[in-house]
Structure formats: structure tokens, C-alpha cells
């Protein structure tokens, strides 16, 4: 997407579909030996654009501005954020639609077609690993809001 205008509104609409409690197996890799559930609670999935400083110190969005995708989830599947981020960028580029994201999310697992994803069904797009970073981790199920508040206040 470098050098191309992203449809931020479409990206945000698609991201909003992924917030809440869902089976994210369409957006992750699950080992057959992993007994954990693919149902996760995405507390927040936010798409923002860094603003450039314009004339007289005003803030303005530009197509060259950095786009960030911030996710808070109780647990992530393998490659989940690469698949979500890549797919959201594809939505922004017009190569996938918001409805495609809903379809991928509604599909229980890629194994439902015996390991093959039917050509007629949209599939997620995996972003390259470069550019992705882990900022913070929260531990402790009962302390989620308090831990989040503490970590967000740290410099």
C-alpha cells in the first residue's frame, strides 16, 4: 500500500466487525495439537493515521502519514495480527471489502473445506512481519481494566 491512498473509513468499519467475542480461526493458524479455543475477545481494534503538522501548527491527515492498527485481545492466535493487519490494509486499498472481512470471521475454520479454502470464499491477507511490533502485554484475567489503565499511563 506504500504510496497509495488508503480508505481509512472502510478500514475502521472492517475493524469494528472484529471487536468483541468471536471465533478468530479464519484469522489465525491453529495447530491440531492445541486444545485452546479459537474464541477470543478483541477488546479494541483501532485504525488510526498519524497526523502531519501543517501550517501554523495545525494537524492534518495526509496520504503519506503513518497508519497504525492497535489491538487489545485476551489472547492471539499464531499469525492473527499479521492476518488482521494485512486484511485491513487490503480493505483500505479496495482489494477486499468490509463484507469479505465479515465472511472470513463467520467462517468457523479453514479446515471446513478439508484444508482447502474454496476459491469463491474470500481469504485473509497476511502482512509481512516487518513493521509489526508488540508494545505491551497485560496479564491477569481479573485485573484487565486496572492493568490496562496502569500500562497506558506509563511513558
Image (cartoon, rainbow, N blue to C red):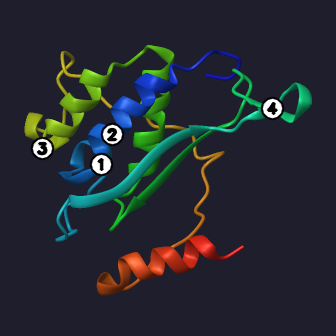
Question: Residue at 60% across / 50% down in the picture?
Answer: 132
Question: In whole angstroms, how far apart are the C-alphas of marks 2 and 1?
Answer: 5 Å
Please identify the quadrant where the C terminus is shown: bottom right
Q: Which residue is mark 1?
A: 19
Q: Secondary structure at mark 4?
A: loop
Instruction: Name the N-terminal-most of marks 3 and 2.
Output: 2
Q: Which mark is residue 58?
A: 4
Cβ–Cβ under 8 Å for marks 1 and 4? no
Q: Secondary structure at mark 1?
A: loop
Cβ–Cβ under 8 Å for marks 2 and 1? yes
Question: Residue at 39% across / 54% down in the picture?
Answer: 44
Residue 30 at what x, y percent from top left?
A: 26, 56
Q: Residues within 10 Å of mark 1 (few under 14, many from 20)?
A: some
Question: In whole angstroms, how far apart are the C-alphas of marks 4 and 2?
Answer: 28 Å
Instruction: Name the N-terminal-most of marks 4 and 3.
Output: 4
Instruction: Name the N-terminal-most of marks 4 and 2.
Output: 2
Q: Nearer the viewer, residue 32 or 124?
A: 124
Instruction: Name the N-terminal-most of marks 1 and 4.
Output: 1
Amino acid at each position: 500500500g506504500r504510496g497509495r491512498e488508503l480508505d481509512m473509513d472502510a478500514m475502521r468499519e472492517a475493524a469494528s466487525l472484529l471487536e468483541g467475542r468471536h471465533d478468530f480461526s479464519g484469522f489465525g493458524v491453529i495447530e491440531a495439537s492445541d486444545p485452546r479455543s479459537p474464541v477470543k475477545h478483541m477488546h479494541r481494534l483501532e485504525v488510526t493515521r498519524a497526523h502531519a503538522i501543517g501550517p501554523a501548527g495545525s494537524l492534518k491527515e495526509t496520504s503519506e502519514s503513518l497508519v497504525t492498527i492497535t489491538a487489545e485481545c485476551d489472547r492471539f492466535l499464531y499469525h492473527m495480527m499479521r492476518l488482521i493487519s494485512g486484511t485491513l490494509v487490503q480493505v483500505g486499498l479496495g482489494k477486499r471489502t468490509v463484507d469479505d472481512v465479515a465472511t472470513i470471521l463467520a467462517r468457523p475454520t479453514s479446515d471446513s473445506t478439508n484444508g482447502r479454502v474454496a476459491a469463491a470464499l474470500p481469504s485473509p491477507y497476511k502482512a509481512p512481519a516487518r513493521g509489526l511490533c508488540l508494545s505491551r502485554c497485560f496479564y491477569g484475567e481479573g485485573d484487565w481494566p486496572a492493568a490496562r489503565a496502569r500500562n497506558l499511563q506509563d511513558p
